[in-house]
Amino acid sequence: GQNIDQPTEMTATEGAIVQINCTYQTSGFNGLFWYQQHAGEAPTFLSYNVLDGLEEKGRFSSFLSRSKGYSYLLLKELQMKDSASYLCAVRDGGYNKLIFGAGTRLAVHP
Amino acid sequence: EAGVTQSPTHLIKTRGQQATLRCSPISGHTSVYWYQQALGLGLQFLLWYDEGEERNRGNFPPRFSGRQFPNYSSELNVNALELEDSALYLCASSLGEWKLTGNTIYFGEGSWLTVV
């Protein structure tokens, strides 16, 4: 089966660091994506991992461990505008489709 | 460069009617994906088209169908609308050829379908 798990909600303080975890069990694996989605808007691409390790892109970093079926998104120096849902998605190996988790709603407080 | 464009932005239909949603991919992209996002729920994969052919479909009934045109634009048709079809329908596009560096899927702004 296919299963992607993320925490439903998280809260953090402006200026702090937050880590959003994602675990997955899929029939195939051909990369893991993180998307940001503000309420009522389309998801926007944040990061992509296909090999184990850390990918850093400004205030955002994403980590992947394929053997553990685990990824996390790290957000540093949090800003109020980072309040959004963060979607973990796995590309199913042979079928070229993204399977999405339910998303993690992050609320950043002053 | 224009992103993925979808129309209409909002659509209201009556139960039992048909809805048609349209999508134009990013220039150069040959793969088009359709996702449904019901209120408060995650993105559910509907359909994937590449080079004019349906390559894969999600776990949705046959009344959800679509096609991809020679210019790679696509339309999603939902027949015999039901109340639970009310959702945001997102179209996304990517390069058709898979590469190790990954062909990121880019989303349009979506079409809100309300069934009353």
Image: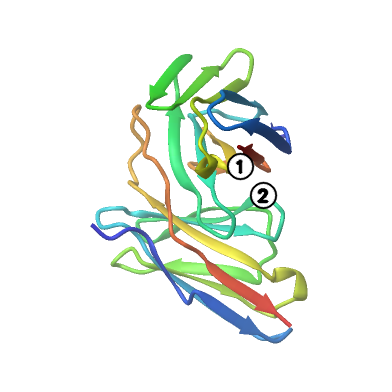
Relative depth, front residue between A44 and A29: A44
Q: Residues within 10 Å of mark 2 (few under 14, many from 20)?
A: some
Does residue A3 appear anywhere in the picture?
A: no
Residue positioned 60% across, 64% down in the render:
B88
Instruction: Say yes or no: labels 2 and 1 on the same chain.
Output: no
Residue A85: give x, y in percent of width and height.
Answer: 60, 44
Q: Residues within 10 Å of mark 1 (few under 14, many from 20)?
A: many
Relative depth, front residue between B94 and A27: B94
- Residue where numbered disc 1 is placed: A100
Does residue B58 appear anywhere in the picture?
A: yes
Residue B89: give x, y in percent of width and height.
Answer: 57, 64
- Residue where numbered disc 2 is placed: B42
- The quarter of the image holding the N terminus of chain A is top right
Task: Answer left or right for A34 relative to B62.
Answer: left
Residue A49: give x, y in percent of width and height.
Answer: 45, 25
Dot 2 lies on which element? loop
Q: Is residue B110 above or below residue A57?
A: below
**Dots 2, 1 in contact, CB < 8 A:** yes
Q: CA distance from mark 2 to mark 1?
A: 7 Å
In the rendered structure, which amino acid carries the disc numbered 2?
Answer: Gly
Dot 1 lies on which element? strand
Task: Answer left or right for A7 relative to A84.
Answer: right
Give the farthest residue toward the right: B83
Give the farthest residue toward the front: A110
In the rendered structure, which amino acid carries the disc numbered 1?
Answer: Phe
Residue positioned 57% across, 68% down in the render:
B65
Task: Answer left or right for B59 relative to A74.
Answer: right
- The quarter of the image holding the C terminus of chain A is top right
